[in-house]
Image (cartoon, grey):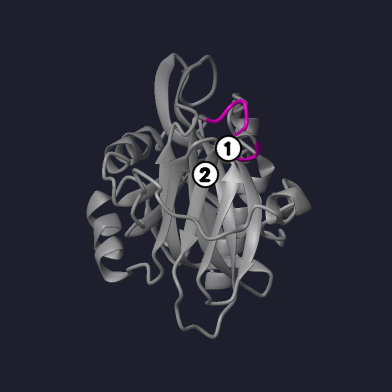
Amino acid sequence: MQLTSSSHTAEKRFSQCGRYLRSAVFALVTLFGGVEAAQAGAKGVIELYTSQGCSSCPPADELAAELAKDPDLVVLTLPVTYWDYLGWKDTFAKEAFNERQYGYAALRGDRSVYTPQMVVNGDDHAVGSNARQVNRLLKRDKLPVDISVSLDGDDLAIEVERHRTSKSATLWAILYQKKGTVSIGRGENRNRTITYTNIVREMRPLAKWNGDAMTFKLPKEDAMGRKADGFALVLQTKQSGRPSRILGAAMLSSPSS
């Protein structure tokens, strides 16, 4: 389904989710060693914009679940609210996700947003159920910066490699719920039960990055929220105040285990 674009400010509400690392966290920035089970940097980031009120979305939700099995991919589901008026209020949706999708569309010069949509590496997009097109975009567009995240005792150990670049970026911590099953009672998907994968619950800016190597530890109690059982990192640029090219990413499931 398609919706005409409007002048939303991308990531306005995401920026309200958290400030750059608090002084207590900055105090933990340090070189570290002996970390086990480090997660290698991802080769691609897929953002699925979907809605429980969209009858064409379930095939894309299923594709997201399949793609999420690939350890080289960071696959995130960002449910939107703009189809809620059709009769069912999406139980996972946030207006901040609408704004993020509008931001991508405005930067590309698109006249509209739609569901299901998969945005690949913050750059190009495809219909979210079109596996062939999504895989083509992944093969064409590689992430240039390696990032790793691992558990080190009570901390998450994070490392971003040095990379020569003229662009600064923000390192985001993304808290997600690995699975969520919803029985939909009204709207276009009424009487259907749909399972969603890697549902974004919160997105927090951690640090600015200017191309230098960066290593630090973040207490996992600070990093994780009550509704999240997964943790991802995304290094992303901005252009004209809108989300733009993703340079690197990594994912760590169930860091509390």
Whether residue 226 is in magenta: the answer is yes
Apparent side of residue 163 relative to residue 137 in the rendered image (left or right): right
Decide: few, some or many residues near mark 2? Use Cα within 10 Å; few <14, some 14-19, many ≥20: many
Q: Secondary structure at mark 1?
A: helix
Question: Which numbered dot is residue 126?
Answer: none
Disc 1 marks which residue?
Answer: 220
Is the C terminus in the top left, top right, bottom left or bottom right quadrant?
Answer: top left
Answer with the quarter of the image where residue 87 lies. Answer: top right
Alpha-carbon span between mark 1 and mark 2? 6 Å
Label 1 Cα neighbours within 10 Å, binned few <14 / some 14-19 / many ≥20? some
For the magenta stretch, what is the residue range? 222-228
Could you say which quadrant of the image residue 171 lies in?
bottom right
Q: 85 and 122: which one is in front?
A: 122
Compared to residue 14, the image places residue 223 above or below, namely above
Q: Is residue 37 shown in magenta?
A: no
| Discs 1, 2 touching: Cβ within 8 Å | yes
Residue 26, given in percent of the width and then of the height, sits at: 70, 56
Q: Overall secondary structure of the magenta stretch?
A: loop
Task: Name the residue type under label 2.
Answer: Leu
Question: Residue visible at 33% across and 54% down?
Answer: 40
Please report the residue visible at 67 percent of the width from the left and 56 percent of the height from the top. Answer: 11
On residue 156, which mark appears?
2
Question: Residue 217 vs residue 252: left or right?
Answer: right
> Which three-letter amino acid code belongs to the residue tagged 1?
Lys
- At horizontal 27% and vertical 58% (from top left) the residue drawn is 133
Location of residue 226 in the rendering, given as x and y in whole percent from the top left corner: 62, 26
The picture places residue 100, in percent across and down from the top left corner, at 61, 55
Whether residue 4 is visible here, answered yes or no, is: no
